[in-house]
Image (tube, grey):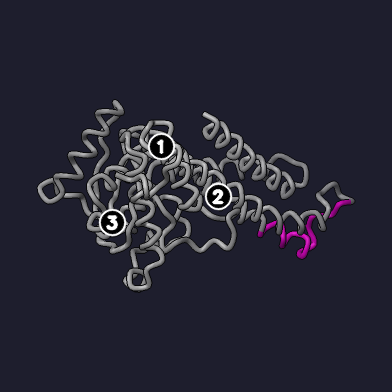
Amino acid sequence: MFKSAKTFVLLAALSGLLLVIGAMLDGGGGGFLTIMLVVAIGMNFFSYFYSDKMAIKMAKAQPMDEARYPDVYAMVRSLSQRAGQPMPRLYVSPSPQLNAFATGRNPDHAAVCVNEGLYRALTPEELEGVLGHELQHVYNRDILIGSVAAMIGTAITYLALMLRWIPIMGGGNDREGGANPLAMIAASIVAPIVAMVIQASITRSRESLADHTGAELTGKPLALASALAKLERGANDPQLLRAGGTKAETNPAMQHLYIAAPFGGRAAAKLFSTHPPIPERIAALEEQARRMGQLGPGQSFPAGWR
């Protein structure tokens, strides 16, 4: 509940930042701000309906054949029924990287995509842990939340660029009631950074929530912890890194969709990272396992792993 409340507070802050920049560009009037609201709504509408198709295409994914992957279908069918939710469409990407993602605007129009590399590397219990995590992304509406945050963040960045040019071109005269040119330049530099930090905070919060609720759904937090440990080792394997990946994995705007940042992520600092550090996620799953009676007080992953 806390993570959900935190998400909506962060989204409100991101939207508020967009409105502030729109108001500065408008110089106190309402016309430009109204246009920005319409643009933001239009961008969110497009993302809401088409983000799943774009993600699947960029991942070069194909519909998963149940005859070839009966274990995946059985796991997802069982977990969906346990959650009382619709079963998403299943896809497989040819990528050798150890990763997976979920996409779609709601549980009735969702898809889960598993990389071939991940399917080959995980045990059945580990794969079930990953699938539980991805299903909870769908059921928690995380794909929609992440898409909205990304679109607002993009709009803020473009508006900030406009703020930077208006004083240079002679606009923003403070004596005519407009915003102070220095304030506009400062905002143009600070606003995109703040937007990136807020957006990253949102995606990290949703990843932590999907870990927790996914482990609740499967009843096996240590299976997900074991899978995450393998994902981290894969992200640091030079041979696997040289194998490359799909456009979805190399596109920074798509990183938030995956269970772990592709290729280990490229963020220079935790503030800008789309995912919590995997050791922190494993520690949280260990604590969850202790609460569920699956680890003793002195045990830890992987020593207590069965």
Horizontally, residue 153 falls left or right of residue 83, namely right
User: For the residue labelled by badge 1, is the local secondary structure a helix, a strand or a loop?
Assistant: loop
Q: Residue at x 42, y 34 (%)?
A: 140
Q: Earlier in the sequence, mark 3 or mark 2?
A: 3
Residue 271 magenta: no
Q: Earlier in the sequence, mark 2 or mark 1?
A: 2
Quote the CA–CA distance across marks 3 and 1. Answer: 30 Å
Q: Which mark is residue 200?
A: 2
Q: Quadrant of the C terminus?
A: top left
Q: Earlier in the sequence, mark 3 or mark 1?
A: 3
Residue 173 magenta: yes
Horizontally, residue 15 falls left or right of residue 263, namely right
Q: Residue furthest left?
A: 67
Magenta segment main secondary structure = helix
Which amino acid, mark 2? Ala
Q: Residue at x 89, y 51 (%)?
A: 175
User: For the residue labelled by badge 2, is the local secondary structure a helix, a strand or a loop?
Assistant: helix
Residue on which disc 3 sits = 118
Q: Do the numbered discs 3 and 2 sit on residues whose CB atoms are within 8 Å?
A: no
User: For the residue labelled by badge 3, is the local secondary structure a helix, a strand or a loop?
Assistant: helix
Which amino acid, mark 1? Gly
Which amino acid, mark 3? Leu
Which mark is nearer the camera, 2 or 1? Answer: 1
Q: Position of residue 193 (x, y in %)?
A: 65, 55
Q: Do the numbered discs 3 and 1 sit on residues whose CB atoms are within 8 Å?
A: no
Q: Which mark is residue 296?
A: 1
Q: Residue at x 50, y 48 (%)?
A: 280
Horizontally, residue 21 falls left or right of residue 142, namely right
